[in-house]
Amino acid sequence: MAERLPGLVVSGYGGFYQVRLENAAVIDCKPRGRLKQSFAKIYPGDAVTVSLLDDGSGMIESIGERRSFLTRPNIVNLDRVVIVLAWSLPDYDLLLLDRLLVLAEMAGVQALICWNKMDLCPASSRPVFRRLQEIYQRNGYPVFGVCAQQPDTVEPLRRALGQGISVLAGPSGVGKSSLINVLLGAAHAEVAAVSDRLRRGRHTTRYARILPLGERTADGFLADTPGFFTLSLPDDFITANLPLCYPEFRRCTGCRFDGCMHDKEPDCAVKAAVKAGEIDEERYRRYLRLLQELKDREVKY
Ligand code: GDP
Ligand code: ZN
């Protein structure tokens, strides 16, 4: 039997897949017949084993278990989402940021925050940025202040994307495409021309590729298409899960009631922590707004 090599699916279209082997070579592959039946599809991010054929192409023999699944673009085994905001043009919206963080928590992926267009942040507003950076970092979300037009400023973010698969997400106009170009650099430009012919127009938001962020596999991979996130929490979102999506609430123990929603309940450890200044009051207020939104929806159904 031919040797089986481990690989990572980096792109796929119409039954043909590109698989990156451990020596960084990317080969064209087709799935073996029985895989076509047992799996509806193979996606970028899939860990596969391939056997090499005489013509230099490969046959996908098996697909590893999937840890996560993102739609639009369709990518599996996502490790990390970078939530991109702009300092201005458009102005950042912290309620939207918290919504996206909740979605990342629900999806079980690590979230990083990238504040782009920091060239538009005047020196007098720097303390505001540093305060926000401090609040979110304290809760476990690394915060980067960058300017896509000054590639040097993007380096710390690039280093944080080592290992695993990342995707950029955020509202339109904040600079996601600009940042993808900076982060992927030459690798991106090289293949962009070919793929644009293959993936014309509206398909691009669904058929993403993951491209290497460096020469070594350990440098990580980035989707060449920004993630699509609905701005509202999904319809099937369970209200009781909302407080679990806040790292600073998870650390608070000692609410009188199990399943405390940290709203009107007495003897609430979260509210006490807000009062004591240990939890940021503004973020807590935004939490209450999201909670109210979910409750209003429950009444409607
Ligand atoms: P996307 O919709 O999130 O993909 O945003 P784009 O990458 O298309 O960028 C939107 C606009 O913002 C473009 O006109 C960019 O040139 C501009 N832009 C991107 N990054 C920066 C930045 O760091 N500073 C400034 N001033 N403008 C930027
Ligand atoms: Zn509570």
Image: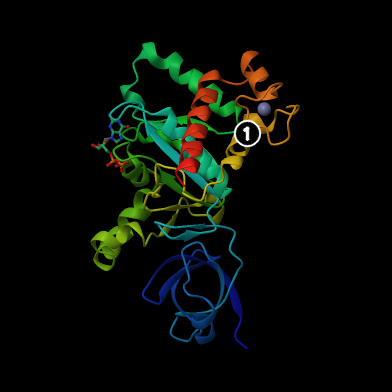
Relative image position of residue 277 (x, y in whole percent): 62, 14
Q: How crowded is mark 1: few (under 14 residues within 10 Å), some or many (20 or more)?
A: some
- The amino acid beneath tag 1 is Pro
Pick the residue in front: 46 or 249: 249
| In-image side of 67 versus 31 (left or right) | right
Pick the residue in front: 209 or 187: 209
Q: Quadrant of the N terminus?
A: bottom right
Which residue is labeled 1 in the image?
247
- Whether residue 157 is visible here, answered yes or no, is no
Q: Answer with the quadrant where ligand 2 appears in the image.
A: top right
Secondary structure state at the residue bearing disc 1: helix
Residue 44 position (above or below residue 214): below
Residue 173 position (above or below residue 138): below
| In-image side of 232 versus 250 (left or right) | left
Pick the residue in front: 151 or 104: 104
Pick the residue in front: 103 or 16: 103
